[in-house]
């Protein structure tokens, strides 16, 4: 066993991660047990997802072995388990179906080529330290895409669940139309297997959530199909089976890039990369929140990229982090990424032992499992929560769902992300600008009196007629320029508007060149009307922009204040004494020292 201080351990920790230093007999035992559970979960998923992608089942199984091991060893998360996923499988089918016949040798070659390109893109994103890009992949858009994918999964699975042959039919609307017009051709055997498999899987999941419900249901569905295939009654003949695997061992492959199609494949790979990275980092963060581990996004992306690159040379298709396997892996007590490595090795052994039985798995049983997956992916409870909490996010998710069902999947992903960015830009384009004042407690010293938002505080004291207190909340950049400029103009043009402006700017986190020019225009306008502009606690980043543009010199250092009390104490003496003498508000402590007009017209 390596010790933390030994040179091999230090070298291994640099290559694979700090988890190497946590290895112990107890950790290895926990990882072996978690790996066994991972194998049980991965086998039916690999078969089902490869079928969903229009690929031979062995590619799904290989993808649950090779990328799983590589991503675990070279990624960042200790508990994320990679492999084929429903969303990526469906996306691959939808993107490649227009280019080649589903399941054909050309289709398989395109899948391998896209997998290689996705892996290279993922690795480059991590190597160039661009992991922060994942923060711009909207979770709401991903949720809408996942829900749309769930509907598509159910539609495509319906064909095999009913025992129909829809070869050559492409697109969800066409598939659904085909099913509706061929209901008369449906036998009884395939629906029987599908319904029994679905009922058993759902019942096991509901009664024993931690049981290998999908595997047990798949075994039961296969046994039932074998029994039904021995019947001579009409309908039994429509039971389709998975068929024999050419080899239980991952087969070497050489992705063939069609250079004429490279631009199109690159666009498809980019869309797949967005989905894969979004899913992986979301899953990694969710699992890390439970385990307490910190995630290095760049290392995680490099590990995922390397897994897809290596996988493309071993007959694997696009993989990423799998929530259905990662959370159970953590719950099973996995200590290190070796749990995923053991899962891959055990899968290899298991497939070699039962490859003959795998060939007899009925497609109707796989379709039933896909329908169960589709239902769990749609997540009705999450839709209700979005409707209750954020209608904007609800409509973004809904628009992405519709686009996923009606458009090409890469377009749906881009559309959802763009909608999220547009909503974000719209929100930030209207930063809050709140008029501040005091409540009805004038007896406290100014430094101790809390400022309140005048418009939302009934009974607030009147505002000073000469000094406007304005709290700036948000960034002043080119997108927000018009809103901020219009608000400042309205404040200046209001009847009896104060000529002096104190901007409470500690929440103004950022300005760009356009924002700096806007404040320069405001300063010029205020001074032209006999007033001035002052700032309370501007951020260092804001001051840096002002220095580069020369605004700080135009403003003057005596117009910047570290706290509101010091600002008011310095500004009040600069106000017009004649107006102060007639003022009845006198809301500042400093107002008491200003001359006041008596009833006889004399100053007191």
Image (tube, rainbow, N blue to C red):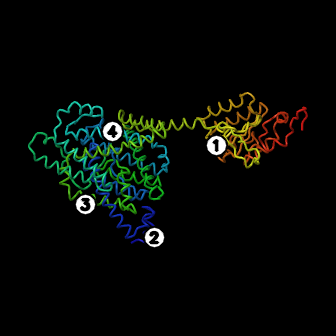
Q: Which residue is mark 2?
A: 4
Specify the quadrant of the image occupied by residue 267.
top left
Instruction: Find out whether the residues at labels 4 and 1 contact each other: C-beta distance under 8 Å.
Output: no
Q: Which residue is mark 4?
A: 151
315 relative position to 492: left or right: left
Relative vertical location of residue 496 with respect to residue 590 in this rendering, above or below:
above
Q: Which callout, 4 or 2, points at the residue further toward the start of the chain?
A: 2
Q: Residue at x 48, y 36 (%)?
A: 392
Could you tell me how far apart the alpha carbons at marks 1 and 3 are, in whole angstroms?
60 Å
Q: Which residue is mark 3?
A: 349
Q: Which callout, 2 or 3, points at the residue further toward the start of the chain?
A: 2
The residue at the far left in this view is: 232
**Mark 1: secondary structure:** loop
Which label lies toward us, 4 or 3? 4
Q: Is residue 389 visible?
A: yes
Q: Is residue 322 visible?
A: no
Q: Which residue is mark 1?
A: 508
Task: State the residue in front, 145 or 128.
Answer: 145
Q: Which callout, 1 or 3, points at the residue further toward the start of the chain?
A: 3
Binning the other alpha carbons within 10 Å of mark 3 as few (below 14), some (14 to 19) or many (20 upward) gives some
95 relative position to 179: left or right: right
Which label lies toward us, 1 or 2? 1
């Amino acid at each position: 066993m390596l010790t933390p201080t030994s040179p091999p351990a230090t070298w291994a920790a640099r290559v694979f991660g700090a988890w190497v230093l946590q290895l112990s007999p107890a950790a290895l035992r926990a990882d072996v047990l978690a790996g066994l559970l991972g194998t049980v979960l991965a086998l039916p998923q690999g078969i089902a997802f490869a079928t969903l992608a229009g690929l031979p089942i062995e590619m799904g199984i290989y993808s649950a072995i090779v990328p799983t091991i590589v991503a675990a060893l070279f990624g960042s998360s200790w508990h994320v388990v990679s492999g084929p996923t429903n969303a990526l499988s469906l996306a691959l089918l939808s993107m490649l179906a227009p280019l080649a016949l589903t399941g054909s040798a050309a289709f398989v070659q395109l899948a391998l080529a896209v997998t290689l390109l996705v892996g290279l893109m993922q690795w480059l994103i991590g190597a160039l330290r661009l992991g922060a890009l994942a923060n711009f992949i909207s979770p709401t858009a991903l949720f809408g895409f996942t829900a749309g994918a769930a509907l598509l999964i159910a539609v495509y699975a319906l064909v095999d669940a009913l025992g129909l042959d829809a070869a050559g039919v492409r697109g969800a609307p066409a598939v659904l139309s085909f099913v509706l017009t061929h209901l008369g051709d449906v036998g009884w055997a395939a629906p029987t297997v599908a319904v029994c498999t679905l009922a058993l899987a759902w019942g096991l999941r509901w009664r024993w959530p931690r049981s290998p419900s999908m595997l047990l249901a798949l075994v039961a569905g296969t046994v039932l199909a074998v029994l039904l295939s021995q019947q001579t009654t009409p309908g039994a003949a429509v039971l389709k089976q998975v068929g024999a695997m050419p080899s239980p061992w991952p087969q070497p492959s050489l992705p063939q890039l069609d250079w004429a199609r490279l631009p199109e494949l690159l666009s498809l790979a980019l869309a797949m990369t967005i989905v894969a990275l979004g899913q992986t980092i979301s899953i990694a963060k969710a699992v890390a929140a439970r385990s307490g581990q910190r995630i290095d996004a760049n290392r995680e992306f490099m590990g995922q990229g390397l897994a897809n690159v290596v996988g493309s040379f071993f007959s694997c298709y696009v993989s990423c982090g799998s929530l259905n396997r990662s959370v159970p892996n953590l719950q099973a007590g996995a200590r290190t990424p070796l749990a995923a490595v053991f899962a891959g090795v055990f899968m290899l052994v298991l497939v070699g032992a039962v490859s003959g039985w795998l060939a007899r798995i009925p497609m109707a049983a796989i379709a039933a499992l896909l329908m169960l997956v589709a239902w769990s992916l749609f997540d009705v409870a999450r839709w209700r929560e979005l409707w209750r909490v954020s209608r904007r996010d609800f409509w973004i998710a809904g628009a992405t769902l519709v686009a996923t069902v009606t458009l090409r999947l890469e377009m749906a992903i881009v559309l959802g992300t763009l909608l999220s960015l547009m909503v974000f830009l719209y929100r930030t384009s209207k930063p809050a600008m709140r008029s501040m004042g005091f409540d009805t407690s004038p007896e406290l010293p100014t430094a101790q009196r809390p400022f309140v938002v005048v418009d939302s505080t009934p009974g607030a004291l009147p505002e000073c007629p000469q000094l406007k207190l304005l709290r700036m909340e948000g960034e002043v950049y080119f997108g927000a320029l018009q809103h901020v400029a219009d608000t400042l103009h309205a404040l200046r043009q209001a009847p009896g508007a104060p000529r002096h402006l104190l901007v409470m700017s500690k929440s103004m986190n950022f300005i760009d060149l356009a924002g700096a020019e806007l404040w320069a225009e405001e300063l010029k306008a205020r001074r032209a009307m006999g007033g001035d502009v002052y700032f309370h606690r501007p951020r260092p980043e804001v001051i840096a922009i002002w220095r580069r543009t020369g605004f700080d010199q135009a403003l003057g250092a005596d117009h910047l204040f570290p706290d509101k009390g010091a600002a008011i104490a310095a500004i009040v003496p600069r106000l017009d004494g004649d107006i102060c003498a007639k003022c009845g508000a006198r809301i500042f402590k400093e107002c008491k020292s200003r001359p006041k007009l008596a009833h006889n017209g004399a100053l007191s």
